[in-house]
Amino acid sequence: MEKMNAAVVTRFGEPPHYQPFDLPAPAAGEVLAEILAAGLHPRVRSGAAGSHYTSSGTLPMIPGIDGVGRLPDGKLVYFASDNDVLGTMADKALIDPRRSVELPAGADIARVAAAMNPAMSSWVALRRRVALQPGQSVLILGATGNAGTMAVQVARRLGAARVVGAGRDLSRLRALPALGADDVVQLTDDADATSEALAAAAAEADIVLDYLWGLPAQRAIMALLTARSDRSRPLDWIQIGAVAAPTIELPSVALRSANFRLQGSGQGSVSPRGYLAELPSLINEITAGTIKVTPRPVPLADVAAAWAASEPPGERIVLVP
Ligand SMILES: NC(=O)c1ccc[n+]([C@@H]2O[C@H](COP(=O)([O-])OP(=O)(O)OC[C@H]3O[C@@H](n4cnc5c(N)ncnc54)[C@H](OP(=O)(O)O)[C@@H]3O)[C@@H](O)[C@H]2O)c1
């Protein structure tokens, strides 16, 4: 059996090891593409830990959910993979060419691999879950991470009149106005002060993009709803990430006393066809530089060390075979 090099998870809870792996055989409709770069996104980590909601628990597995690859015909493409056993962190990966998008000439491969997953979270939410109307006001809860920082830029690009970024890290919050935020709110352990600050900055928000969930979201929901001037005006809350905690307590009164509309955005709530339709326009934004991204290329052979390293704020590790 012909072999390739890959990042291989043999036990959940352990980082992947760089080792030989059987070259996968394409099924009908698939091709074997040469991988040029694959982003180490939080979603990749949860898949490799066997804890993502799409995980089948099969081992050994190759992590990686997307990447930039070269097809056998020479085309450079960005593609997403939903194969939770044979992922993209390898010399080669299986691609369904119909689920890939050709990169424009001169595209920066590492930037595309780093930015597509975090940027897509807000791009798809604001185009496929709740279509942002020009002039609306958006709060990003968890605006200091890669996805949240890009969400500030995406909301602005899609026509938001007011964008507020909320997060823990003050130095990263201070960088947001230069990227399009009108105001920022620091989330601290002082629940009352945080609620007051959120209410002052974002009580009239139309849409919240929530990357945190857990206590910060639980408190923010009540802070915004109680401070709203007109509670019958819709507040669309789009749940995207859960870096703070997987659950919240939601008082039923939140749903009765205000026009609070709670939904999520991710794999499943948006169809593969829906994601695919958004890829070309988002690739254009990223290659045009509308969305700031700082890739950190690391050789795939160093995957175990990359896994253990904490990502410098604002950077996204991209593994390069
Ligand atoms: N549904 C989708 O379509 C989709 C797509 C992409 C990503 N996501 C999800 O979005 C989330 C963020 O992804 P990312 O790529 O931006 O990750 P990231 O770059 O690692 O950012 C995570 C951020 O969360 C902050 N954070 C962690 N715990 C927090 C807490 N308790 N309160 C406030 N902030 C907290 C961290 O900031 P500090 O530690 O500096 O405060 C960090 O800036 C992940 O859950 C990811 O899975 C969802």
Image (tube, grey):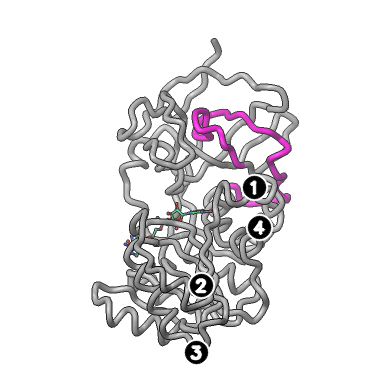
Of residues 225 and 101, the one nearer the viewer is 225
Figure quadrant, ligand 1: bottom left
Secondary-structure class at tag 4: helix
Q: Residue at x 65, y 22 (%)?
A: 26
Q: Earlier in the sequence, mark 3 or mark 1?
A: 3
Cα–Cα span, label 4 and label 1: 17 Å
Mark 3 vs mark 4: give the one in front: 3
10 Å neighbourhood of mark 4: few (<14), some, or many (≥20)?
many
- Amino acid, disc 2: Phe
Residue position for label 4: 282
Disc marking residue 97: none
- Amino acid, disc 3: Ser
Residue position for label 2: 260
Quarter occupied by residue 94:
top right
Secondary-structure class at tag 3: loop
Q: Residue at x 45, y 27 (%)?
A: 61
Of residues 318 and 119, the one nearer the viewer is 119
Q: Earlier in the sequence, mark 4 or mark 2?
A: 2
User: Where is residue 200 drawn, in percent x and y?
Assistant: 41, 87
271, above or below 152, in the image: above
Ligand 1 within 8 Å of disc 1? The answer is no
User: Where is residue 82 drawn, in percent x and y?
Assistant: 57, 37
Residue position for label 3: 229
Residue position for label 1: 271
- Amino acid, disc 1: Ser
User: Where is residue 52 drawn, in percent x and y?
Assistant: 43, 42
Cα–Cα span, label 3 and label 4: 35 Å
Residues marked 4 and 2 touching at CB (< 8 Å): no
Q: Which residues are magenta?
A: 80-109
Residues marked 3 and 2 touching at CB (< 8 Å): no
- Number of marks: 4
